[in-house]
Amino acid sequence: MTIKTYDVRRDGVTRVIQPEAEAVPLEQPEVTQQFPACECPECHGGTS
């Protein structure tokens, strides 16, 4: 996997900082990087 690093100014102008860098994905994200479980009624079958 590759990642492109760029800067965006307040006026919307962008500039590339690093055109391409190799990024090794984790098999399982660290606990601090995971989203919390969804608590919406649809995901809980209409019960909360």
Image (cartoon, grey):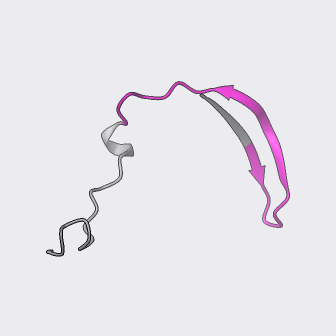
Q: Quadrant of the C terminus?
A: bottom left
- Residue 34 screen position, x and y as percent: 35, 46
Q: Quadrant of the N terminus?
A: top right
Q: Is residue 9 left or right of residue 31?
A: right
Residue 45 occupies quadrant: bottom left
Residue 38 occupies quadrant: bottom left
Answer above or below: position of 23 versus 45. above
Q: Is residue 8 magenta?
A: yes
- Residue 31 screen position, x and y as percent: 30, 41
* Residue at the (83%, 67%) spot, across then down: 11
* Residue at the (68%, 27%) spot, across then down: 21
- Residue 19 screen position, x and y as percent: 78, 33
The magenta span reads 6-29
- Residue 30 screen position, x and y as percent: 35, 36
* Residue at the (26%, 71%) spot, across then down: 42
Residue 22 occupies quadrant: top right
Answer above or below: position of 3 versus 41. above
Q: Is residue 9 magenta?
A: yes
Q: Is residue 48 left or right of residue 12?
A: left
